[in-house]
Amino acid sequence: MYDIKDKRLATKGRARIEWAARDMPVLVGLAKEFSKKKPFKGLRIGACLHVTTETANLMLALKAGGATLRLCASNPLSTQDDVAAALAIEYGIETFAIKGEDNKTYFKHLNAVLDLKPHLTMDDGADLVSELHKNRTDLIKNVIGGTEETTTGVIRLKAMAKSGALRFPILAVNEAQTKHLFDNRYGTGQSTIDGIIRATNKLIAGTTFVVAGYGWCGKGLAKRAEGLGARVIVTEINPIRALEAMMDGFRVMPMQAAAKRADIICTLTGNRDVIDSTHFVAMKDGCIIANSGHFDVEINLKALKKMAKKTGSPRPLVDEYTFPKGKRIFVLGEGRLVNLATAEGHPASVMDMSFANQVLGAKFILENKGKLENKVYVIPEAVDREIAQKKLKALDITIDTLTPVQKKYLESWEEGTS
């Protein structure tokens, strides 16, 4: 079973999947290990993730471990159609994803994955788990647990756990240091810039570039924009992060003030209406706005559409909103994840660690079946360190180790000033 755009794209997709695998030595190594041990034999895994070359290699690792899989997209614009075709046709993995699918199709695909009656869920944004808890509760009895890939999803799932709504344990892959320190910072930073440039072909140098949110994703984007010669402004609601941004050398101010100066604004907060009506009014002609948070709620597009006299599309996935007095505002990727809507998402080398966390996280949940409560857990530190060690080895990097004397010193309290 599958629902893809065009099966003729499968050969192209396979070549791109194999290209990505070259930069994913940790995941490929785990796939080889799993092909012998089959830790997921008999396990049904339902996955709702961005359908990219990197995700394809995650699916292949899980399949090598013996899992039965179904995959759908976690965002209507994040699918790479050639990859979806390759997974379905070349690799026999049931895939339900079409780039640009409407909401009706998106939820049809979610439910196609849930029709597998999964033992384990893999989510990016928590839409699969949400649908399961809202409309497919009869299937929850089959579920051992799940993993969550992104900040937005973790926020939703923690809210579910706090309210008592969560009915099985979740492992927050996003909280692993080998995920958020690298994927969120370096992956999002580079791929977001890539998406903005591909969509607009604009020069970043010399622009005033506003970054909304200074979490790990915002930090990465701010540094990449600065590196390309932009004058970077950060907006924040968290006083500690705002102070950190200032000490990192960026101007910090409210969005209302930043919007007046901005040539480009990008949101990465996980919250809604970060750019709203008053900000649209403040913007100058030609301002470009984009979102690199998971959901398309960070830019209030409903308000923008009401304010605009007319709309157009001067370039693919660039929407032009013209105000009554002639001012124009440009929105990239329909306000969805710009790094996937208009580019290819994170580089494979950082997703190597993120998806290693996914497979080892799935293994952890399986090994602890029945022992975990219905709450959100952090990836065990031992797993995090194992992934980092494997990545260093793959990169041919060695580090120091503690001597017996140093180890004893760190474990004692008696020694101090000598």
Image (cartoon, rainbow, N blue to C red):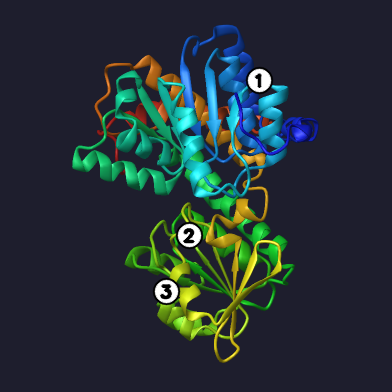
Point out the tag, 1 or 3, that comes first from the N-terminus.
1
Instruction: Categorize mark 3 by other alpha carbons within 10 Å: few (<14), some (14-19), many (20+).
Output: some
Q: Which residue carries the number 3 mark?
A: 276
Choose between 402 and 167: the one closer to the eye: 167
Q: Is residue 398 visible?
A: no
What amino acid is at disc 1? Gly
Q: Secondary structure at mark 3?
A: loop
Which amino acid is tagged 3? Asp
In-front residue for pair 67/411 = 67
In the rendered structure, are the residues bearing label 3 and label 2 in contact, judged by CB atoms less than 8 Å apart?
Answer: no
In three-dimensional space, the C-alpha distance between marks 3 and 2, rounded to whole angstroms, equals 15 Å
Q: Is residue 415 left or right of residue 223?
A: left
Residue 312 appears in the picture as rendered:
yes
Number of marks in the rendered image: 3
Q: In the rendering, at what x and y percent does residue 266 appear? A: 53, 66
Badge 1 local density, few (<14 within 10 Å), some, or many (20+)? some
* Residue 230 image position (x, y, % from top left): 63, 73
Of 352 and 298, the residue lying toward us: 298
Residue that extends furthest to the front in the rendered view of this protein: 104
Which residue has dot 2 on it? Answer: 268
Q: CA distance from mark 1 to mark 2?
A: 35 Å
Label 2 crowd bin: few (<14), some (14–19), many (20+), radius 10 Å = many
- Relative to 117, does residue 250 appear above or below in the rendering? below
